[in-house]
Image: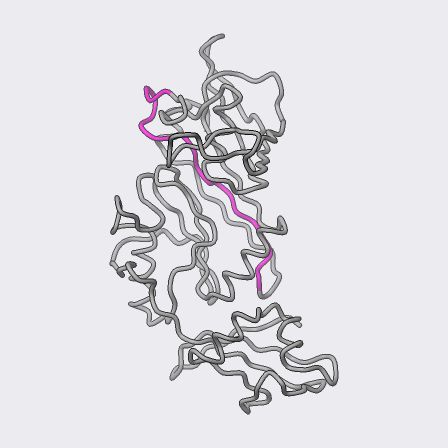
Amino acid sequence: MTPSSTAMSTDNRFRLSFTVETDGVGLRDFLADCGISRRTLTAVKYKGGEILVNGEEKTVRHVVRTGDRVMVIFPPEKPAEGLFPEEGELTILFEDDALLILDKPAGQATIPSRDAPSGTLANLVAGKFRAEGTPATVHIVTRLDRETSGIVCIAKNRHIHHLMSEKMKAGGVCKRYEAIVRGSFSEQHFFIDKPIGRKEGSIIERTVRPDGQRALTEVSVLETDGIPGKEISRLSVILHTGRTHQIRVHLAHIGHPLEGDTLYGGCAERISRQALHCAGLSFSHPLSGVAIEVTSPVPEDMRAAGGFRR
């Protein structure tokens, strides 16, 4: 049951269509098999959505037949409270009716906070949605720290956000980072499997601790350069879990903090921010199942900090 999304000129609510392939199934169960959660169905029922079978509105108690065409029209969404739409430049790597994938520069927060209430990626996306008449709030699927550059994935609907979250939990989303660290490595490919939790006395820092949440990081050494004792290494890093500051904490724990990451012991001589960039994102599309692979080139400040040949 591969869904299709459609749009109407007079009604820009997000919608999905499905064709029934099994006779005599309750509409609620059919939609559950299509990946639509009970919470989403409740929102459809009470917040301005519709469920149509062959063009006629039905309740979830309706029994569908083979060949029936089911359309779910999702309710319009309002921007989250405190998220003010703003105009600004966005670097779009991929976009369709369901997803928006962007290239975030270092120094820009992903979402508003007390310290950064405006100018964030989410503010600019909300402005884009408002300008285009997209009735949605901003659903961040993959978030980056303010000083980490690279790929950020955003869902255009709460249902798509749910599907992507489930895909991430199941390991169906691969995020690849590039990092610059001080020192050389005896192994060219290895895993760091250490639990991470909040550092005592800090609301920001994380640390490896026995009672933390499991965190698994895969590291490949791409290149090492420099004289003995003062080497710089370029790493490819894949996250298998998504803990706060995971790459920064794990690399610092093994004695190789990110260049520029002074919070975790890195040196700021070569670069003024943590040398970390989300360079690749791959997954199967939550609606079509088509393989999506997006890449982002490493920015100039990291290339300069590493001094590598590329």
* Quarter of the rendering containing residue 217: top right
In magenta stretch: residue 272: yes
In the image, residue 235 sits, relative to residue 159, either above or below, namely above
In the image, residue 285 sits, relative to residue 120, either above or below, namely below
Residue at 59% from the left image edge and 89% from the top image edge: 54
Q: What stretch is highlighted in magenta?
A: 267-286
Give coordinates of residue 191: x percent, y percent: 62, 29
**In the figure, is residue 234 to the left or right of 145?**
right
In magenta stretch: residue 193: no
Give coordinates of residue 283: x percent, y percent: 58, 52
**Outermost residue, bottom direction?**
56
Give coordinates of residue 123: x percent, y percent: 30, 56
Give coordinates of residue 257: x percent, y percent: 45, 23
Q: Nearer the viewer, residue 136 or 225?
A: 136
Please state, as top left, top right, bottom left or bottom right, where the N terminus lies in the image: bottom right
Q: What is the number of callouts on the image?
A: 0
In the image, residue 49 sits, relative to residue 301, either above or below, namely below
Residue at 29% from the left image edge and 59% from the top image edge: 83
Residue at 63% from the left image edge and 71% from the top image edge: 34
In the image, residue 239 sits, relative to residue 263, either above or below, namely below
**Which colour scheme appears in the figure?**
one colour
